[in-house]
Image: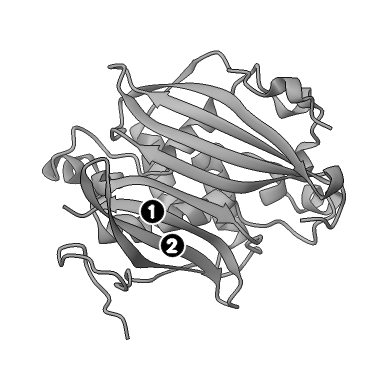
C-alpha cells in the first residue's frame, strides 16, 4: 500500500528546453501532417514565433525531466504494474521551440478500489515558460494493479 | 445523419468532427514514440518485460492515442481554441491495432465568458474496442 503521507507532496521545480529537433521527431512518431508542428518556415508563416508544440507535448517534455523527489519506486510501486488511467490538460499559453519550461509536480491524491487491489495516484503538474507565464496544467491518474488480472 | 463540419462553420450540437485513422500501430511506431515522447517504459517496447509483467505482448502508449485525439481536435479547430480536455484510458491498445478517432459536439456552453463547444471525443480500435474516451472544451467565438 502506498503511504498516504505522499498526498500533498510537491516536487522541486525542474526545467527543460523545447528543441526543434524533438518536435520534429514527435511529429514523425505521431504521424502529424500539419507543418506548423515540424517546419519553422511554415510555423512563422502561420504567425508562430517558432515551431509549435502540439497539445500533449508538454506531458512528454515533463517526462524528459522527471521529478527525482517523486519516484514511484521510492513509493514502493512496481512500475511494471502501472497503467495510465486518466489524463487531462488545461492550456493557457502555447509552447514553442526555444522555450524553457519549468515544471512543478504535486501528488494531488492517492486512493484505492477493490479492497486495495487497485491503487490510484493523481499527479498535477504546472508548466511555466521563461517569462513566468503559465502554459498548461496537466493532471495524470496512474493505476497500480497489485493483483494480476484486476483492471 | 449528422453533418461533418469544419470549425469555420459555426459548430452546432450533433456536429461530427472529421474522423482520424491511424496505424496499424507497429512495434516500430512504438519504438519511435518511446523516443520522441521520452516515455521509455519498457513495457511498450520490450516483449520480454511485457511478458514478465504478465502481459501477452507489448501494447501502445495511451499517450500516443491521446496525441491522435489532439490531431482530431487541431484539424477541426485552431490549437489556441483548445481550453481544456480530458480522457480516460478504458482499454489497452494492442500492438498492430488500427486506431480510429472521432468526436461530436454535445453542448454549447459559456465558460469564463467565452462561447465554447463541449466535444465528446473517443478512440477505438478497428475491432470496435473503445480505448480512450473523454471531452474537450473548445472556444467557438
User: Which residue occupies the foreground of this view, A126 or B19?
Assistant: A126
Which label sits on residue A74? none
What residue appears at the point 75 percent right and 25 percent down from the top-left corner?
A4
Residue in the image at 50% along x and 65% along y:
B123
Residue furthest top in the image: A12
Judge from the rendering whether residue B107 lies leftward or rightward of residue A81; answer left or right.
Answer: left
Q: Relative to B125, is A133 on the left or the right?
A: left
Q: B65 or A147: nearer the eye?
A: A147
Q: Is residue B92 above or below residue A124?
A: below
Mark identifier at residue B121? 2
Q: Nearer the viewer, residue A33 or A68?
A: A68
Give the quadrant of the N terminus of chain B. bottom left
Q: Are marks 1 and 2 in contact (CB under 8 Å)?
A: yes
The structure residue drawn at horizontal position 58% and vertical position 17%, both measured from the top left corner, is A11
Chain letter of disc 1? B
Mark 2 crowdedness (10 Å alpha carbons): few <14, some 14-19, many ≥20: many
Numbered disc total? 2
Q: Quadrant of residue B93?
A: bottom right
For label 1, the SS is strand
Identify whether B25 is placed above or below B137: below
Residue sitting at x 62%, y 60%: B90
Q: Which mark is residue B136?
A: 1
Q: Residues within 10 Å of mark 1 (few under 14, many from 20)?
A: many
Image spot of residue B127 (x, y percent): 60, 78
Q: Is residue A38 visible?
A: no
Amino acid at each position: 500500500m502506498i503511504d498516504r503521507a505522499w498526498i500533498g507532496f510537491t516536487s522541486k521545480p525542474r526545467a527543460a528546453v523545447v528543441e526543434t529537433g524533438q518536435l520534429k521527431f514527435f511529429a514523425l512518431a505521431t504521424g502529424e501532417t500539419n507543418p506548423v508542428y515540424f517546419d519553422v518556415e511554415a510555423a512563422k508563416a502561420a504567425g508562430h514565433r517558432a515551431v509549435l508544440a502540439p497539445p500533449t507535448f508538454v506531458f512528454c517534455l515533463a517526462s524528459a525531466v522527471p521529478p527525482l523527489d517523486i519516484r514511484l519506486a521510492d513509493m514502493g510501486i512496481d512500475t511494471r504494474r502501472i497503467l495510465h488511467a486518466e489524463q487531462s490538460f488545461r492550456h493557457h499559453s502555447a509552447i514553442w521551440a526555444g522555450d524553457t519550461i519549468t515544471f512543478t509536480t504535486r501528488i494531488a491524491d492517492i486512493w484505492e478500489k477493490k479492497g486495495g487491489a487497485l491503487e490510484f495516484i493523481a499527479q498535477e503538474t504546472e508548466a511555466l515558460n521563461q517569462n513566468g507565464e503559465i502554459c498548461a496544467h496537466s493532471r495524470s491518474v496512474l493505476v497500480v494493479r497489485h493483483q494480476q488480472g484486476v483492471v | 445523419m449528422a453533418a461533418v463540419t469544419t470549425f469555420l462553420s459555426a459548430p452546432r450540437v450533433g456536429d461530427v468532427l472529421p474522423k482520424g485513422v491511424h496505424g496499424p500501430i507497429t512495434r516500430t511506431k512504438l519504438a519511435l514514440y518511446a523516443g520522441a515522447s521520452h516515455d521509455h517504459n519498457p513495457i511498450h517496447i520490450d516483449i520480454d518485460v511485457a511478458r514478465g509483467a504478465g502481459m501477452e505482448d507489448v501494447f501502445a502508449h495511451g499517450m500516443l492515442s491521446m496525441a491522435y485525439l489532439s490531431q482530431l481536435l487541431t484539424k477541426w479547430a485552431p490549437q489556441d481554441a483548445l481550453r481544456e480536455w480530458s480522457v480516460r484510458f478504458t482499454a489497452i491498445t494492442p500492438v498492430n491495432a488500427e486506431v480510429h478517432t472521432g468526436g461530436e459536439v454535445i453542448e454549447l456552453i459559456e465558460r469564463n465568458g467565452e462561447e465554447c463547444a463541449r466535444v465528446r471525443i473517443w478512440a477505438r480500435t478497428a475491432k470496435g474496442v473503445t480505448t480512450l474516451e473523454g471531452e474537450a472544451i473548445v472556444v467557438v467565438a
